[in-house]
Image: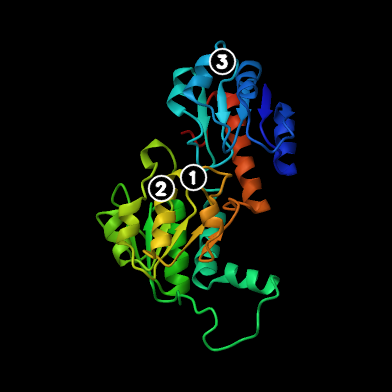
């Protein structure tokens, strides 16, 4: 089988892929363009795409006679692939759940602590040569131990974040989820996002992306937040109405935000760049060699299983 891989991957993943398939590796790190997506669908038996390789319904329709039978997405999120359109054209789709859980939860903790303790602001102060020395009221932040964590989206990643916050920092956990959840830690499920935002000191978004969750978090949620509270997003940028977040931060409706993703990524609004109380990361959610290798290995395993018997390990 001919396999097209849309971006460079860890060497161990490429070695496994090359042992099983006739691999064409695209060396660019940018998303696939229209013509590249059409060629991948027409000329290869399998495609291994990733974030921002936008395989839309229009792309599948335009491709016409397609050779590809499977898209093995590198990543748990697959909102850049129109799965219904893919299946309508006889193309199976898989993703890589589980492999991303711990690394993404760790990134959430990084953002929580950096935002609460004003770490980004403090580092900029030191690097700019403006730090004048310690004093008792210097850069006072939020003490996270014992606070209330609100998790929006209690899937694998949401639960991993809740575990870290409850057992590591003694936080009370409340959450909002589309369906009831029985958890292996003390937590209260609340009826709405606004109800959660009203009681949480730290709000973390951990939902999937896609049409159903676009602008799930908007002005009403931010108005409900406590003025000392922090907002953290490690999900997908479009889940949050970015303009509403900027307005809420400007109005002091919340104390700060920690963001790893953006609505129009990689563009980051100048208003956010100018805010000292906002921590901004370049989508580092799963950026460890171990996590990215595990993701790639699961993607290749899906391809191998599909080639062998038409089955996927983690279908979507």
Between marks 3 and 2, how big is the CA–CA gap? 33 Å
Q: Find disc 3 in the rendering and name its residue.
A: 63
> Residue 24 location in percent, x, y?
73, 27
Q: Which mark is residue 50?
A: none
Image depth: mark 3 or mark 2 in front: 2
- Assess whether mark 2 and mark 3 are in contact (beta carbons under 8 angstroms): no
- Assess whether mark 2 and mark 1 are in contact (beta carbons under 8 angstroms): yes
Between marks 1 and 2, how big is the CA–CA gap? 7 Å
Q: Residues within 10 Å of mark 2 (few under 14, many from 20)?
A: some
User: Is 84 on the left-hand or right-hand side of 94?
Assistant: left
The answer to whether 131 is drawn above or below residue 213 in the figure is below
Depth check: 30 or 253 in front? Answer: 253
User: Is 170 on the left-hand or right-hand side of 137?
Assistant: left
Q: Quadrant of residue 12?
A: top right
Q: Residue at x 44, y 64 (%)?
A: 163
> Residue 210 location in percent, x, y?
43, 38
- Assess whether mark 3 and mark 1 are in contact (beta carbons under 8 angstroms): no
Q: Find disc 1 in the rendering and name its residue.
A: 263
Depth check: 208 or 293 in front? Answer: 208
Q: Is label 3 in a helix, a strand or a loop?
A: helix
User: Is 232 on the left-hand or right-hand side of 26?
Assistant: left
Q: Is label 2 in a helix, a strand or a loop?
A: loop
Q: Residue at x 70, y 41 (%)?
A: 9
Q: Is residue 144 visible?
A: yes
> Residue 249 location in percent, x, y?
42, 61
Q: Residues within 10 Å of mark 1 (few under 14, many from 20)?
A: some
Q: Is label 1 in a helix, a strand or a loop?
A: loop
Q: Which mark is residue 241?
A: 2
> Residue 61 location in percent, x, y?
50, 16
């Amino acid at each position: 089988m001919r396999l097209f891989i849309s971006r460079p991957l860890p060497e161990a993943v490429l070695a496994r892929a090359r042992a099983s398939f006739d691999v064409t590796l695209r060396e660019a790190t940018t998303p696939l363009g229209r013509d590249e997506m059409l060629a991948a669908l027409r000329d290869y038996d399998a495609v291994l795409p990733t974030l921002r390789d936008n395989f839309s319904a229009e792309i599948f329709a335009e491709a016409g006679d397609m050779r590809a039978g499977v898209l093995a997405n590198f990543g748990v999120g697959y909102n850049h692939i129109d799965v219904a359109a893919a299946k309508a054209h006889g193309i199976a789709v898989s993703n890589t759940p589980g492999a991303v859980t711990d690394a993404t939860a760790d990134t959430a903790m990084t953002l929580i602590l950096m935002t609460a303790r004003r770490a980004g602001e403090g580092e900029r102060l030191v690097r700019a040569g403006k730090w004048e020395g310690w004093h008792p009221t210097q850069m006072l932040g939020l003490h996270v131990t014992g606070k209330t964590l609100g998790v929006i989206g209690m899937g694998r990643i949401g639960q991993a974040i809740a575990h870290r916050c409850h057992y590591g920092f003694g936080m009370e956990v409340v959450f909002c989820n589309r369906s009831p959840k029985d958890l292996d830690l003390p937590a209260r499920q609340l009826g709405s996002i606004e109800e959660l935002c009203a009681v949480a000191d730290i709000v973390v978004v951990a939902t999937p992306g896609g049409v159903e969750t676009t602008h799930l978090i908007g002005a009403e949620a931010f108005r409900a937040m406590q003025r000392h509270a922090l907002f953290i997003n490690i999900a997908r940028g479009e889940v949050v109405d970015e303009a509403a977040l900027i307005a809420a931060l400007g109005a002091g409706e919340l104390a700060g935000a920690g963001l790893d993703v953006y609505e129009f990524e990689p563009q980051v609004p100048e208003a956010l760049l100018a805010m000292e109380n906002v921590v901004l990361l370049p989508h580092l959610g799963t950026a460890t060699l171990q996590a990215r290798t595990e993701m790639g290995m699961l993607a290749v395993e899906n391809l191998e299983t599909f080639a062998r018997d038409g089955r996927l390990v983690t279908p979507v």
